[in-house]
């Protein structure tokens, strides 16, 4: 006898479980690679995108007025 290490196995893992395990490992590697190459958390945002977000937040909080917001937005784009 094979002692439970065959196709079905005695422990319930078997060939299907082993395939599922390898699929999960490969999927994890792909997701980590995608995360690393997209710039980590936040996707592929640039520093300019983040600066514009901060500017919008400051305007929304009332820290700057509309004229200052528009001027700084032009400065970021140009």
Image (cartoon, rainbow, N blue to C red):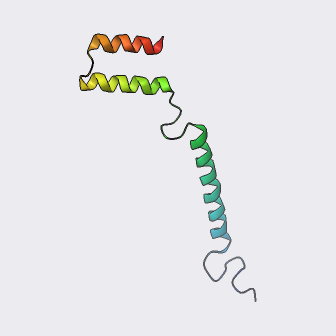
Q: Identify the residue at the far left of this view.
A: 62
Q: Is residue 14 above or below residue 1?
A: above
Q: Quadrant of residue 20?
A: bottom right
Compared with residue 63, is residue 40 higher up or lower down, i.e. above or below?
below
Q: How many marks?
A: 0
Q: Is residue 61 left or right of residue 7?
A: left
At a point 63% along the width and 48% down the height, the residue shown is: 30
Instruction: Check the image and name the residue furthest to the bottom.
Output: 1
Where does residue 9 sit, x and y in percent of width and height? 67, 80
Answer with left or right where residue 6 lies relative to residue 54. right
Is 3 placed above or below 78 here? Answer: below
| Residue situated furthest front in the rendering | 63
Q: Which residue is nearer to you in this view: 36 or 27? A: 36
Question: Could you say which quadrant of the image residue 25 lies in?
Answer: bottom right
**Residue at 64%, 83% in the rendered image:** 10
Q: Residue at x 51, y 27 (%)?
A: 46
Question: Residue 52, how many percent across, how many down?
Answer: 41, 22
Q: Residue furthest right?
A: 1
Image quadrant where one finds the N terminus: bottom right
Q: Residue at x 31, y 12 (%)?
A: 68
Q: Position of residue 54 (x, y in %)?
A: 37, 26
Q: Position of residue 76 (x, y in %)?
A: 44, 16
Classify residue 33 by image quadrant: top right
């Amino acid at each position: 006898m094979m002692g439970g290490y065959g196709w079905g196995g005695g422990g319930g893992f078997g060939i299907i479980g082993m395939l599922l395990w390898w699929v999960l490992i490969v999927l994890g590697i792909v997701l980590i690679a995608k995360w690393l190459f997209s710039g980590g958390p936040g996707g592929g945002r640039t520093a300019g995108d983040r600066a514009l977000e901060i500017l919008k937040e400051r305007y929304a909080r009332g820290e700057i007025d509309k004229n200052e917001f528009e001027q700084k937005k032009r400065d970021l784009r140009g």
